[in-house]
Amino acid sequence: MKQIYYELDCSALMCYFEVRINDVCVFSLNVDGQASMDIPINSGILERGEQDIEIRVSPLSGGTKLHKESYVRYKVIEYDVSSGDFQFVQQFENFQTAPVQENIPFIIHKSVFMSTVSYKLDAWQNGVNLKDVKFDLKKALLSEYNIIIEALNNKDYNFFREKLSNKEKNIAIAMYLKPSESKDRISQIISEIEDGFKTMPIDTNVYIEYSAYNKLATLKRLNRMSALYLENSKTGEEIVLDISFCGLPGKKEFVIF
């Protein structure tokens, strides 16, 4: 069976930008200068068929205005990785964000492409619209985050693995990871916790960011980074854990995707 893999061949100038596939952020970067990169996007593809791409361009972190020459250029490249190598299949159309306009602090560019992946993920497509819930969503999310923080600080790694099991299973399927490679992803985080990193308390100024057409929600700090992160007090390094919560019909507990 073919293992079809997609990358965004992307370049950006003087901006903070996000790549969303089917309204799920798969990549974000603050580019203070110029940068080119290849961005894996299979993690945002649930199944074969039409896929939505959205590029969000905003001012550099800490700024309020877009640089006059800010842009993002991109194209989708399709590979077959069945053999273990990247075998080129096809390239889709090139796109570039519109020129910066005075007094407009952001740019959004949308496009679509057809995917031929052979897998189908069981994920957020089954979730409820989190903007329609009748309870205090932010309070509920804070509770979920604090449970994870407490588990990590108490070194309850089995609980941590279980909470992320759905997310990691889907990543392994979409990225064609071997079982050992999938296991290593969580093991690496745990290893760094043991090497002096400590999970930090949630900032009081966090806000909710919705994605996946309002079926996922995450808490973000004002610097646009995930509210869940670890810090090494000796080196000042951070490890950011990007997790999003989904509510499934008939279930009280959130699921992480």
Image (cartoon, rainbow, N blue to C red):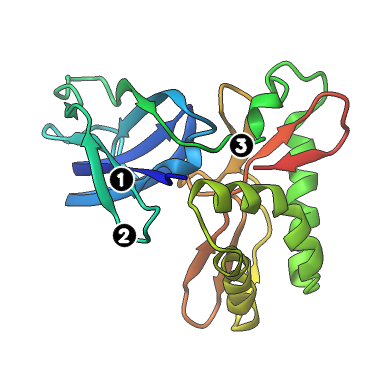
Residue placed farthest to the left in the image? 69
Which residue has dot 1 on it?
Answer: 79
Amino acid at pointer 1: Tyr
For the point 52% across and 65% down, which residue is it? Answer: 239
Q: Secondary structure at mark 2?
A: loop
User: Where residue 34 sits: x, y (%)?
Assistant: 15, 50
Amino acid at pointer 3: Leu
Q: Which mark is residue 111?
A: none
Q: CA distance from mark 3 to mark 2?
A: 23 Å
User: Where residue 85 sits: x, y (%)?
Assistant: 31, 60
Residue placed farthest to the top in the image? 132
Q: Secondary structure at mark 1?
A: strand
Q: Is residue 23 left or right of residue 69?
A: right
Instruction: Looking at the image, tell me whether mark 3 or mark 2 is earlier in sequence order.
Output: 2
User: Where residue 243 sits: x, y (%)?
Assistant: 61, 47
Q: Is residue 106 left or right of residue 244?
A: left
For the point 42% across and 25% down, which residue is it? Answer: 51
User: For the residues carrying marks 1 and 3, which lies nearer the camera in this image?
Assistant: 1
Which residue has dot 2 on it?
Answer: 85
Which residue has dot 3 on it?
Answer: 121
* Dot 3 alpha-carbon crowd within 10 angstroms: few under 14, some 14 to 19, many 20 or more: some
Amino acid at pointer 2: Asp
